[in-house]
Image (cartoon, grey):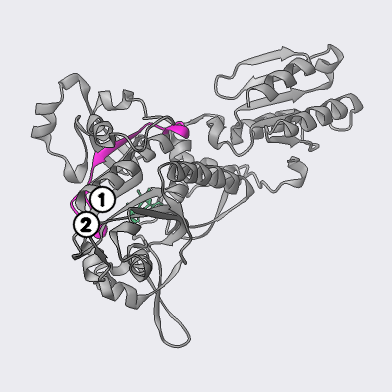
Amino acid sequence: MRLSRFYMPVLKDIPSEAQIVSHRLMLRAGMVRQQGAGIYAWLPLGQRVLNKIANIVREEQNRAGAVEMLMPTIQQADLWRESGRYDDYGKEMLRITDRHEREMLYGPTNEEMITELVRASVKSYRQLPLILYHIQWKFRDEIRPRFGVMRGREFLMKDAYSFDVDEAGARRAYDKMFLAYLNTFARMGLTAVPMRADTGPIGGDLSHEFIILAETGESQVFCDRDLLELAPPGPDLDWDGDLRALVAARTALYAATEEMHDSAKFAAQTPKERQVSARGIEVGHIFYFGDKYSKAMQAMITGPDGQDRPAQMGSYGIGVSRLIGAIIEANHDEAGMIWPEAVAPFGIGLINLRVGDSACDSACAQAYAALTAAGREPLYDDTAERPGAKFSVMDLIGLPKQLIIGPKGLAAGTVEIKDRRSGEREELSLDAALNRLCANG
Ligand code: P5A
């Protein structure tokens, strides 16, 4: 992508309404723009990161055997009356009336809708197990939308729903999502710690929140330091193997959110030097709630014994848009964001220090073509800005590598590679630079 053709409205001033660094940087870099309290337009740079994150989430869901679909954002109130949640959900639900005076709502979550869909066609245990998911916008009329995309009113969620004939099957689905989440967050360069959590309006009695430790986190959390060192199960995980043991190894040590915290238990289970009490960002939340919805909505399954019973269900959420804020909170410095390779909006920032100079233009054209062909997704700064401004914008948007091409270097036969995270710079020939950058894709 050429910067001159892209749309990235960088702000010079630090927006005063933004209290935390991720929100400030997202506004400054022109990733999002507020359209109302807790409602954001995703500008092209933000949209690219959102897509990268959604794709990682999607790949890991598919790997765990979940099946993608897409449900609408607008739902019928009657569906929620069946489960009893229409009244329970309260003011967080955005209620709408259509031209026929029918009561509708903008979905804050989809347990009811998926239960209705599955009950229409799944009748026998032979059609199970099933995990269905979608990546769709949600609306929650949060009392205090804040911190930009971290607590929005409209936000993008991956929500999955599992259906099983018995508790053992449902527990296996829960374990699958638990492990898939660890791999998902690890691929984004995040250490997410699963913590016992309160189930709130979703319900049930088994639930884990996946928490990233960060000073700006909204909740207080408590855990054993050793949990921060545990490696994720990784891509070679055998999904047909003993998942229970893998989950058990990760839930044996103490980890709880404030609502579930028991200080006596924490002290008894955790040596003092390993006790972590910190702020955390909730990037995912999984629930096992058995027959809460299937019983109320009559989603019945015939078992191998010929008896009908309500399906055993769970639901599993990832805050896709919130993750962008969480990743920035975990990866930035004074100059701006520092994207982990896997979610970076572009792979390389190519800077032409003197647009119009034929040697610079042709070296940049060659680099741009080679990097594009190698799938490295370069963002080519071909604008007429002065070098200082180009450097600061490139640092602000935090692409992992920069390739800097200027007249002085070219005269000496060199270009420069800068690593955004370490700040290390290296001068080398254009060919050597392209070989290096194209290879480590
Ligand atoms: C699980 C999937 C649910 O809604 N139903 C379907 C269950 N869980 S949850 O914990 O309420 O939300 C799942 C994740 O969504 C993110 N999230 C938000 N992100 C941005 N702004 C918000 N206002 C917001 N609310 C929830 C969180 O990452 C949460 O873990």
For the residue pair 26 and 436, the one nearer the viewer reads as 436
Q: Position of residue 433 (x, y in %)?
A: 73, 18
Please report contact status of discs 1 and 2: CB closer than 8 Å, yes or no: yes
- Dividing the picture into quarters, in which one does residue 191 lie? top left
Query: Residue at position x 35%, y 76% from top?
Result: 77
The CB of the residue at mark 1 lies under 8 Å from ligand 1: no
Q: Position of residue 111 (x, y in %)?
A: 33, 62
Residue 354 visible, this angle? no
Q: Callout 2: helix, strand or loop?
A: strand
* Residue 193 located within the stretch drawn in magenta: yes
Mark toward the viewer: 1 or 2: 1
* Residue 246 located within the stretch drawn in magenta: no
Numbered mark located on residue 436 in the image: none
In the image, taking residue 39 as reference, residue 5 lies left or right, namely right
Query: Residue at position x 38%, y 39% from top?
Result: 180
- Dividing the picture into quarters, in which one does residue 416 lie? top right
Q: How much space separates mark 1 and mark 2, taking CA atoms?
A: 8 Å
Query: Residue at position x 84%, y 25% from top?
Result: 363
Label 2: which residue? 290
In the displayed structure, 47 sits above or below 120; it is above
Name the kind of residue labelled 2 in the image: Gly
Quarter of the picture containing the N terminus is top right
Label 1: which residue? 170
Q: Position of residue 399 (x, y in %)?
A: 61, 32
Q: Callout 1: helix, strand or loop?
A: helix
Which residues lie in the magenta part? 186-206
- Dividing the picture into quarters, in which one does residue 101 lie? bottom left
Query: Residue at position x 35%, y 57% from top?
Result: 144
Q: Position of residue 400 (x, y in %)?
A: 60, 28
- Of the numbered discs 1 and 2, the one sitting upstream in the chain is 1
